[in-house]
Amino acid sequence: MKHTRILLSLIIILTIFVGVTGCGNKKAEPAPDNKGGISETETPYLQYDENEEEFVYLNEDHPEVVRVAEFVDEFVTVMNTMDYKTISNDKAYPYLTQTLLELTREQKTWESLFNTLKEVEVVSEATGIMIETAHFSNDFEVVYVLYNSTINILQANEEKLAETHMTLGENHERAVLHLQKENGQWKVEGFGTLD
């Protein structure tokens, strides 16, 4: 499972950063129906043209930036706020694309993760999420989000917790989400941690 996450992380990171470095500083013209959310200055939010060669910067109040920020905040909060006594395997399911949902059920990804959390007796809360960058496709159907989050581990079996490379108190995570619209709603299509 760890190798799959690492491979997925590398694929997502390469996709994001090859796109950025390959495009230089070219700026595309905004789509005609999208001029309101375009920034004249550099922001962490980019929208690529259909060839993924040029981009425009989006304002943080652009409707899709707002939707993605809200989705990421909710997903990360739900995933990082847990109590081993009440956690369930299907906690993540509403946030996943149908493709990822089927894959994770088949591979028992969440079941394995949550069994580990139960074994370690984790009680935690999400205390902070910051988006570093979000790269949108031209049609706003796909976005890659690089973010930092803070997880406060309130309680755990410290001996078993040490095996997970986390500690009681604040823990920081840097991760990538590959989001895709499904029936007009943002869903997780891929994910990976960078730390």
Image: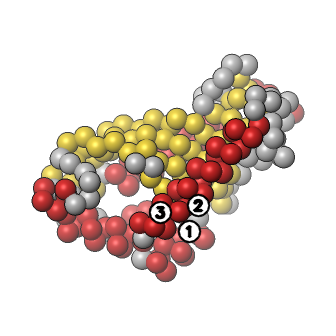
Residue 18 at x, y percent in the picture: 68, 45
Residue hosting label 3: 5
Q: Which mark is residue 100?
A: 1
The residue at which mark 2 appears reads as 189
**Residue 166's spot in the image, x, y percent?**
25, 51
Is 105 drawn above or below residue 52 in the view shown?
below
Residue type for callout 2: Glu
Label 1 to label 2: alpha-carbon separation: 6 Å
Q: Distance between the residues labelled 2 and 3?
A: 13 Å
Q: Residue 121: x, y in percent?
A: 17, 62
Identify the residue at horizontal 61%, vertical 40% (top origin).
134
Q: In which quarter of the image is residue 34?
A: top right
Q: Nearer the N terminus, badge 1 or badge 2?
A: 1
Q: Is residue 14 left or right of residue 122?
A: right
Say which element carries label 2.
strand
| Element assignment for label 1 | helix
Front residue (pair 108, 24): 24
Figure check: 29 above or below 67 = above
The picture quadrant where one finds residue 68 is: top right
Mark 3 or 1 closer to N-term?
3
The kind of residue on which mark 3 rests is Arg
Relative to 75, is 186 on the left or the right? right
Is label 3 in a helix, a strand or a loop?
Answer: helix
Residue at 39 percent across and 41 percent down: it is: 149
Q: What amino acid type should be assigned to the residue bearing mark 1?
A: Leu
10 Å crowding of disc 1: few (<14), some (14-19), many (20+): some
| Residue that extends furthest to the bottom in the rendered view of this protein | 106
